Image: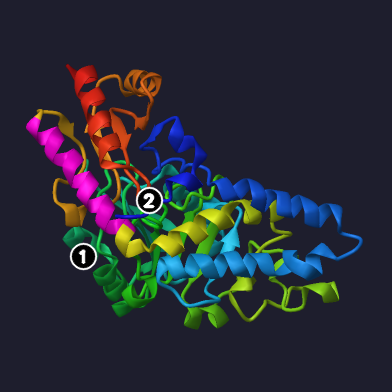
Amino acid sequence: MRDRRRAEFPSLARWIHLLSHSLGPMPRGARESLNRYLRRWEDYGSDNAWRAEWWDLSTKVGDHLALLLGAAPGSVQVQPNASVAQSTVASCFDFSSGRRKILTAALEFPTTEYVWREQERAGARVEVVSSKDGMTIPTDRLLESIDEETALVVVSHASYRTSFLIDPQPIAERAHSVGSLLLLDVYQSAGVLPLRVADWGVDFAVGGTIKWLCGGPACGYLYVRPDLLPTLEPRLTGWIAHESPFDFAPGRIRYDRGVRRFAQGTPSIPALYSCLPGLEILLDVGLAAVAEESRRRTQWIVETALERGWDLKSPAEANRRGGSVMIGAAEPESLERQLADRGVLVDWRPGVLRISPHFFNTDEEIAKALEVVSELFA
């Protein structure tokens, strides 16, 4: 890969950054983008900031995200975070009668079960497909569990715990065959793998900008399959979701006809400014090139782990793995600190180190990081 855009990320001069599954490095352009926001705010009186730029910024960011998700323009609504995005989807369902089953799987990020378990107070019934090996989810068991009682299937494209990568298309097809819908959590795959949520038949997709998208802890997002929009009325709502928000009309909301019906209140304008530079870099580099580098580097890490007898906690096969590799460790928090002391940024979860190369890394960095890990494991 010729252009790694390393000059765009100042912190790469100090660290080997293998942390994109948790926090991507700050692009140099984020500072200037936020300064632009401050100038707009300061000059509000001479050029109305809302009219000049702020009002359209959510749509601009949403359409950038749509390109990265393999979705149509106008199908992604920026959200405060992925938890609110899932909760907004949940608020569209009536669990008091008819379909009540929410099907999810083990290895999900805790938000998923937290959000959907709380829907049981409204009549939902959550069913979790277990993992026999603690690493993967058996797709056949997941498909068998989707039945006529299922309202929604909620699964991650790539697991935050093991990097196990699931194929969404057969899940969407099975769900649709019995009249249910699919919500795909793409937090751990958007920005490192090419996504095709529209082609896969995904109904909802959620994620955020903090990780592979190099956008900081700024925004969550929600993709909604366009033909579903007229049928969905979120109870978690606000004035921005109104068809004509500047009518300031009292009474019940008249939902916007597009994906803005999934908005809530006033958007966080500084967050939108801060995440734009990272999105633009990724779109310019191209996800095909990013994914090719990711697969090569993660395979290198996997093969090194197997050769050196490390406890691999991610699938060994490239087509079953996202952008991270998890290595089992008895004291991963201590190892993370020791790696940071030697200039290598990773992170940990109970029992594992998480290592995530991205397009801006060099082969020399990967080799050095693996040697440091090897020394600490010795």
Residue beneath disc 1: 144
- Provide the major secondary structure of the magenta segment: helix
Q: Residue at x 78, y 73 (%)?
A: 245
* Viewer-nearest residue: 125 or 309: 309
At label 2, counting other C-alpha atoms closer than 10 Å, the crowd grade (few under 14, some 14-19, many 20 or more) is some
Give left or right: position of 267 versus 205: right
Residue 152 x %, y %: 40, 66
At label 1, counting other C-alpha atoms closer than 10 Å, the crowd grade (few under 14, some 14-19, many 20 or more) is few
The answer to whether residue 306 is magenta is yes
Q: Residue at x 63, y 56 (%)?
A: 272
Q: Which residue type does callout 1 highlight?
A: Glu
In the image, residue 305 above or below residue 90: above
Locate residue 160: give its quadrant: top left
- Which residue extends farthest right? 45
* Viewer-nearest residue: 100 or 257: 257
Per the rendered image, the range of residues in magenta is 290-307
The kind of secondary structure element at disc 1 is helix
Residue beneath disc 2: 4
Give left or right: position of 242 versus 304: right
Residue 333 x %, y %: 36, 22
Residue 247 x %, y %: 84, 76
Residue 26 x %, y %: 53, 43
In the image, residue 338 above or below residue 113: above
Q: Quadrant of the N terminus?
A: bottom left
> Residue 238: which numbered mark, if any?
none
**Contact, mark 2 vs mark 1 (Cβ under 8 Å):** no
Q: Which residue type does callout 2 highlight?
A: Arg
* Viewer-nearest residue: 114 or 215: 215
How many numbered marks appear? 2
